[in-house]
Image (cartoon, rainbow, N blue to C red):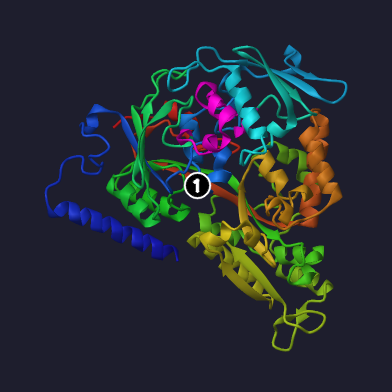
Amino acid sequence: MIKHWIARGVLAWVAILGSACAAPQPADQSRPAAIDTRPRAALKTLTIGYETEPLNLVIQLAGQFGSQGGTELQLAVHQRLAGYDDRGAIRPMLTAELPAQDRGTWIINADGTMTTTYKLRPNVAWHDGAPFTAQDVILAWRVTSDPEIPTTQRRVSSQISGMDALDDLTLIMRWKGAYPFANVITEDDLGPLPMHLMGPLYETDKERFVQSPHWAREFVGLGPFKVTEWESGSHMVLGANEQFWGGRPKLDRIIVRFIEDDSAAVAQLLAGAVDGDIAETVQFGQAMFVNREWEAAGRKPALVVQPTKWRFLFTQFRDPKPQELLDVRARRGLLHAIDRQTLLDALVEGRTLVSDSMIPPTDPKYDWAKDSMARYSYDATRAEQLLAEVGWRRGADRSLVDAAGQRVVIPAWTQPGDTNGQELSIIADQWRSLGATVEESRLTTAQIRDPKYLVSFPGFVAAQIPLSFNNLMSRVNGAQCPVEETRWAGSSWGCYQNADMDAAIRGLQGSIDFTEQQRHWRDLVRIQSQEVPVLPLYFNVTVTLFREGVLGIKGHTVPKTAATWNSAEWDIAS
């Protein structure tokens, strides 16, 4: 399968190069004249491929527009109160300093509520020149707290009872209870949003507010680049923001080409029509193929491979098929039967680590919890022993049968993509070696966009999430069970319920004390690894790849937000 898409990419590349040799072409034929007719040397221009044309650039309203957000572009065009770098260090963005208890700007009240004071960075301007003020953050909080606005993120805003602006640059947040990240708000809940543009519309016509072109083609933000051109179905151009608070970006512009076909993306990278990929427009194997081709030509590309996502199998706990999946011994046995190192070698050239919990060894919290972590090495003998304990044994034809003599059938779903399909096939084959019958299903795009259908998987479904606190907590949180009353919204697709797990999650969400946080993490990892509500597989990687001569590329933040977090520092040497 891997050889198939590599072959397609090479053929497409050859076709492009062949057509280029057939007749003389202008020197800058790789960049469409519609983007800019000036010579390439006139502007420092970086061209990147992007998998799908964004339907919005602020993911707050992704629920209204669908799943196509401009997540990876967001930090190029906008800013948050704070962020992370590629090493996981906290970076103030729109704040002059982060709230701290020793400075009296983070106060924990006797009743358990909190107050934080944010000192905002002075002399920050929106792309249209209007000054950034505390009112812009207050508007974002009001919008994401409003049930009439179809936002996708309310995790932070829902925990805040009120906000006040002491002056244009001093913001007071009142919290309903303890929240350990109250001093580092990196979520989109608090925007900010331009009060001078969006405030009057929000107050007078919420329907027009939601449908406003501000979210995409007329976006006005606070980032180092601003939207200067957007041709639907083709590209957008991000021009340098001369007034950016961090200093003018080193690049003059970034051209974002919308390339939905991964083979076309490979071909354009090899042909030089695209300088790099930040949004996984090409899959891991394709990116490594391009990197090897560049290196074979004597070039030194910028390649960053980072473990940024947790890959696992959700287990169905609502009337699963087979019913024995409710027995932890069945889940443990099936996990022992997966040779996860084989998965890593086949899918990502062994460039990451097997997962026994949701915390990667590179995370400082791993040392807190590693002693409480149950581990499941590949062991077919142990797998058969555990499955025998739930009544699954080899029948006369060596197929696995249950206590009633019925063939054991395990339904397993995965999402679209060649790599996803290859992963499922490897797992299914390993389960078949135990005698199980595995029904593999590769979902369509339409099916994964139907939340009711997606959470109806009968046995297992493969999933992955970025390694961030809220993502990790929500996948095993009983309160996140998708139900009809919530229109099947909820991140715990399998609807796992465990009171001790929920208590550990609540403790982490509300613990300020460092010792308490360590205890809750140990409890969480112990329950997750022993009860196996999801089957952990590995920490999947994100590849950021650019041609030789592109400077300042550091990859994604940790935890993963967007590769454009330091786009103001990107440069071109040649």
Residue at 56% from the left image edge and 21% from the top image edge: 94
Q: Quadrant of the C terminus?
A: top left
Please give the range of residues in magenta. Answer: 185-214
Q: Which of 37/505 is in front?
A: 37
Residue 307 makes an appearance in the image: no
Q: Which of 443/567 is in front?
A: 443
The residue lying furthest to the top in this view is 167
Residue 567 makes an appearance in the image: yes
Task: Tell me: residue 446, above or below residue 229.
Answer: below
Residue 40: x and y, percent?
23, 33
In the image, taking residue 547 as reference, residue 146 lies left or right, namely right
The residue lying furthest to the right in this view is 110
Q: Is residue 189 magenta?
A: yes
Task: Tell me: residue 365, above or below residue 330.
Answer: above
Residue at 15% from the left image edge and 46% from the top image edge: 25
In the image, taking residue 182 as reference, residue 16 lies left or right, namely left
Quadrant assignment, res 3: bottom left
Quadrant assignment, res 276: top left
Residue at 53% from the left image edge and 64% from the top image edge: 421
Q: Is residue 558 magenta?
A: no
Residue 8: x and y, percent?
35, 62
Where disc 1 sits, the SS reads: loop
Which residue is identified by label 1?
Answer: 68
Q: Quadrant of the N terminus?
A: bottom left
Q: How many marks?
A: 1
